[in-house]
Amino acid sequence: MCFLFVYIVSLQSKLKFLGMSFERVQEKLNILADAAKYDVSCSSSGSNRTNTNKGLGNASASGICHTYTEDGRCVSLLKILLTNYCIFDCAYCVTRKSNDIKRAAFKVQEVVDLTINFYRRNYIEGLFLSSGIFKSADYTMERLVAVAKKLRLEENFNGYIHLKSIPGASDELMREAGLYADRLSVNIEIPTEKGLKLLAPDKNRADFIKPMIKVKNEIIQYKKEKKLIKSTPKYAPGGQSTQMIVGASGENDMQIMYTSNYFYKNFNLKRVYYSGYVPISYDTRLPQIGTPVPMLRENRLYQTDWLLRFYGFNIEEILNEQHQHLDLDIDPKLGWALRNLHEYPIDVNKADKHMLARIPGLGMKSVYKILKARRYRELNWDHLKAIGVSLNRAQYFLVCASNKFETRDLTAEKIKGLILQNSSSKYTDLLSNQLNLFG
Amino acid sequence: METTLIYDGSFDGFLTAVFTAFEMKLKTVKIVTKQRFQEPLFGGSETVYTNQEKANRVWAGLKKKMSTDEVRRFYYAFLSEKTIVEDTLYNAIVYVFASKKNVGSDFTNKHILDIAKLTKNVGREKHRMEAFVRFKLTKDGVYFANIEPDFNVLPLIKKHFEKRYADQKWLIYDLKRKYGIYYDLKKVDIITLELDANFDPTKTSSAIFAEVELEFQQLWNDYFKSTNIASRKNMKLHVQHVPKRYWKYLSEKNI
């Protein structure tokens, strides 16, 4: 009798968790985390939600990566789908209707419990909840909002919440979503409308854009009101983001970056993510399974994105009708410098911030260090090296307080060759053909 | 002749030593902790007793000379516990007090640049600990984590955890330095533990930890695997972000 009692107690404590079986939740988590992993956004930054009345959590403005997957990506949020049932049949997507995979769906309470328990153990910064579209856009969006609402109002949770805006969701739901979420995002996935027609015939661009416009307008509205009335609640303080797949539908770099630029400018996006297409289907419209993921290209696109957002470059300077593709063997800033040798050399002791930022091999951190350090004395090569400037690239493009600098009149080709000779890229294997040209 | 000043290892102790060096108008000074002190062949040595008032005066003096951020770097660098750090800090302090204008960001000065670099190292370790602490729920309802950071960052991460986990009891224990910070729902205290000889910090013993604890570790471990994209595998980058020395206390690397 006593023995039996012990057995029941231990069984209860197992079942107590989530009010249901551990194995079932485990299976759902495996399926729905696996399906969500192609969304590259991991950011948990940009929001500043303080812990009020001794609740749980706060959103740290700088974001924290709690671990990294073996592919080297940051794990900051519990990134899952609410369900991978979907009424759409987009060729590039693993959860497309016609794909023969295991389907599962979380209950609202299960997602809440998982988030809270992971958060309490310091595994995550919060939740990134996306979903396949079941029944209708509004039905799906309603469920996503319900999770966020429960976390905020019932669990007193102040951690980070990123919700997907479901294309076609109503304005009313989008308004509510922004009140509980830190960030909202719609993935446009395919950079051009032509590509979208080909790969996702039952979707249209207008449905993607509708929730984006609503959220953008609400953010502006709430910010304005907050200036007048301090108690105005936060509305999506982490802003909006989107993602584009690279290498699935034949767009060139110029098309991708112009689309990206358009979204940054017109929808005040915080981030555009670029996701190298991972082949997941034998559909003849797409790169076949086994095709390598275009990681180097993805990297160059991100570098360009950074040049636009932090280095004061214009998109037309980097990509235009004459240069529709980014160089793979050199970074886009060096590429621009080599095409515009007449702008150089730049004097590090005199040039302003914008010009310093245009020297290849100088990141913004070095730029700020130079600006501070040169107040005390003129900088020479040793100073620059100590500060952390990558002189292999920078030396051809700057002058400093020294009489030793490049005096030969080098052509762009020659400089490129010299730089490549003295650098080793982690992508060397991919590039070996091109490197031979300049070796 | 070089004078060696011996202090107790605390930051206030170090600042008191700096005060003493200025007060005694010593020309060449070496400041060391009593653990590291070795009787010098030449020159004298003197033990400095930590004095809050003197320490505060030095700190206030530095604050007057530099920006908040620049002063903060001196504290961060100190927590690196590097053998050369007292020398670097002392030389930088001499330079700061000797200069008319603020030289806190004069990166052409070796000592100032070294402090900036140490600050970067310590700051990175602080950030890592905010990320890599893995709490395990004990049977007594305390979320417990053990760490072995490269630098003494517990004083730096206290505020972060206090703000974040305001509604749960937690304890972060530094096994290397043998002290921890414990939050009892009201305030954070510094504590030391008498750890049982059988206690294995890499394991989750069912005698100590709650029954659901292993289940959540399993779920977290599963999640960690599911969210990986195998065709993009890049172990070099993975290890760069999560260096191997931290693996033993990360449940996702250890089930």
Image (spheres, rainbow, N blue to C red):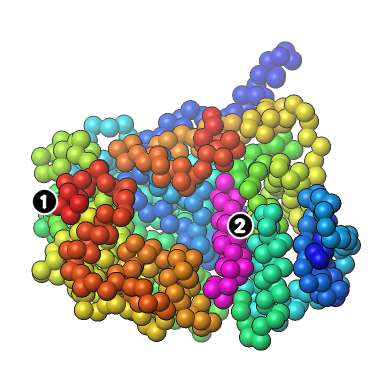
Image spot of residue B227 (x, y percent): 40, 40
Of the 4 image quadrants, the one containing the N terminus of chain A is top right
Q: Which residues are magenta?
A: B105-132
Specify the farthest residue to the bottom. Answer: B100
Q: Nearer the viewer, mark 1 or mark 2?
A: 2
Distance of mark 1 from mark 2, alpha carbons?
Answer: 52 Å
At x 67% / y 71%, what residue is drawn? B92
Image spot of residue A201 (x, y percent): 13, 51
Q: Nearer the viewer, residue A177 or B125?
A: B125
At x 67% / y 76%, what residue is drawn? B95
Q: Nearer the viewer, residue B134 or A351?
A: A351
A239 is higher (above) or lower (below) than B252:
below
Q: Which residue is mark 1?
A: A198
Image spot of residue A379 (x, y percent): 46, 77
Main SS class of the magenta portion in the image: helix
Can residue A378 be seen?
yes
Disc 2 residue type? Val
Q: Which residue is mark 2?
A: B122
A270 is higher (above) or lower (below) than B142:
below
Label 2 residue SS: helix
Label 1 residue SS: helix
